[in-house]
Amino acid sequence: MLSIVTLISGRGSNFEAIVKTAQKERWPVKFAGVIANHSAARGLEFARTEGIPAVVVEHKEHATRESFDEALIEKIDELGADLVVLAGFMRILTPGFIRHFEGRLINIHPALLPAFPGLHTHERALEAGVQEHGATVHFVTEGVDEGPIICQASVPVREGDDADTLAARVLVAEHQIYPRAVKWFLDGRLRIEGNQVKLQPQEPQFFKL
């Protein structure tokens, strides 16, 4: 049985979606722990109610990003993670951290990468006048939001949308594709070839919602 450790900074709604999907579909998986970079992260309480170890590694207690990431690596390895899931973890990870978990570190980004990497994706999508927006699950590499794409889902941009209404629609898509991507990893179906992810056996990796 493979184990997942999730990193959060806030409410951890994608983490909650993954756990609930796993429970509903009876995945053979162990949620080994949730780690937040501050004690006020609301997702910690959900973890506790589910009996999942909830851990805080305060980034403010570390003078450098490297020191924080070293503490994070130590805690993740102690919990035992076959897969590390970033679910709204608002810290830029160091190259050393990323290399340590290479091939087993995934993230969800609220845009259709490679469009709109980084922050403020919904505002930027609206400013650009795109007709479709969405979310991307990808492996994490040292380039910000540049890792191999596992799957994506698009949602329409509607007349009258603002950043909040668009974000809410994208979040629904995130909650659908992130559990799917995690399950594919757990089932050993993902193959990284260059900067692409091949799913074996093949099935759609892009969804129009």
Image: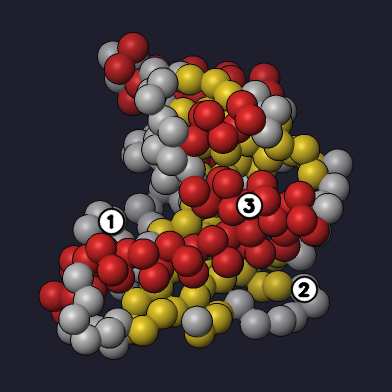
Distance Cα–Cα, label 3 vs label 2:
21 Å
Question: Which mark is in front, 1 or 3?
Answer: 3
Is the residue marked by circle 3 packed among few (<14), some (14-19), or many (20+) residues within 10 Å? many
Residue at 66% across, 64% down: 180
What SS does tag 1 mark? loop
Work out whether 47 lies above or below 59.
below
Q: Amino acid at mark 1?
A: Gly
Q: Quadrant of residue 6?
A: top right
Tell me, for residue 18, which label it has, or none.
Answer: 3
Q: Which residue is mark 2?
A: 200
Percent position of residue 123, x then y: 18, 66
Q: Residues within 10 Å of mark 1 (few under 14, many from 20)?
A: few
The one of 7 and 147 positioned closer to us in this rendering? 7
Q: Are marks 1 and 2 in contact (CB under 8 Å)?
A: no
- The one nearer the camera, 103 or 24, is 24
| Residue at the (35%, 53%) spot, across then down | 144
Q: Going by the image, does 154 lie left or right of 25? A: left
